[in-house]
Image: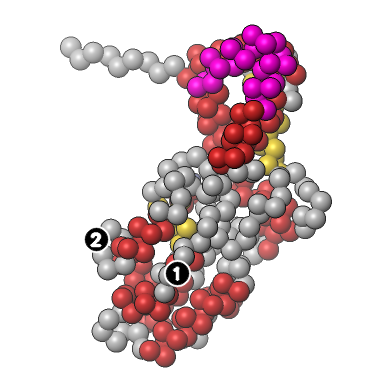
Amino acid sequence: MMWNLPRLKEFDARAHLDTAFQNGEVTEAEKDFLVDLYKQYEEGLGRPSAAMEATGQRAELYTLLHDAYSLVQDGRRLRRLRADIKNLADYCPYCGFAPISDLDHHLQRGRYKLLSIFALNLVPCCHPCNTGKRKSPSDNASEHQLHTYLESVAKFDFLRANVVLDPESGGLDVSFSIEHQDGMDDELFSRLKEHLVEFDLRKKYAKQVNIHLSEHEFSFSMAYEGGSEGLKRYLRGTANGHLKNFGVNDWRTALFRGLAVCDSFCDGGFVKALGMISSSEIIAPPVAAI
Ligand SMILES: [Zn+2]
């Protein structure tokens, strides 16, 4: 599901600290402090703040926690935590299409060292999204990343795909945007727009749209046998299917809704538009070795 994931159920943050630090490197009092910091993180919905950096502890504590993340790797002591978090999603919640390969630190590990192995600060995602995001949160609150577990945006229906056929070439242009909805505060609106920028989604979606639509070419032709109304019905039906499977603000839901209201696409323009996609997607066959 894009944007939001259900959080890990019934995890024991204290037990994770005990598993990571078995030889007294971190004192019981420090573990109490960390568990309290985690509680504050959750109450503050994972928003970046000076409190989350939690300066003022002994210097070694930051290094110990930062380096303990290596235990959250395959084959190491906290591998179960990694596996459980990766199991929360099939696809990256940041872009909505790429398979899970990484764990992202919602609040970046380089800066928020004490949160390095905190389960709610670890989000399963794809490698490009993980490496593409900011290395430190913006100083501007209206650019803060949404929290995948702690801030639900599902009550809004905000992702739009505006579909235009170029009148000259007949080529398809799809641009994704965020709609400001009733009851949505300005800060959330800005943060949603920033999400498209931070994860470079406009560019990533341009490619996904082409791949996705070229797979539907035959179905579109079949539906068009019922005329433009037939095609619109098919597009709306597919949008509803995506809505059920992937959620309201999924890029595929938005795409099919956008296609269904593009008259020039549904009046037969899709043939040329998809033809241009298919021919640009053809990959040259490998040259036989001599
Ligand atoms: Zn991604």
Question: Closer to the camera, 75 or 276?
Answer: 75
Q: Amino acid at mark 1?
A: Glu
Residue 10, horizontal then vertical, whole percent: 45, 69
As drawn, the residue found furthest toward the right would be: 182
Residue at 56% in and 72% down:
42
Residue 252, horizontal then vertical, whole percent: 59, 34
Residue at 64% in and 9% down:
225
Segment tinted magenta in the rendering: 214-236
As drawn, the residue found furthest toward the left would be: 290
Callout 2: few (<14), some (14-19), or many (20+) C-alpha neighbours within 10 Å? Answer: few
Image height of 70 relative to 186, above or below: below
Looking at the picture, the colour scheme in use is secondary structure
Question: Closer to the camera, 25 or 217?
Answer: 217
Q: Can residue 176 be seen in this snapshot?
A: yes
Quadrant of residue 25 in the image? bottom left
Q: Which residue is mark 1?
A: 10
Q: Which residue is mark 2?
A: 75
* Predominant SS of the magenta segment: helix
Give the spatial CA distance, label 2 vs label 1: 22 Å
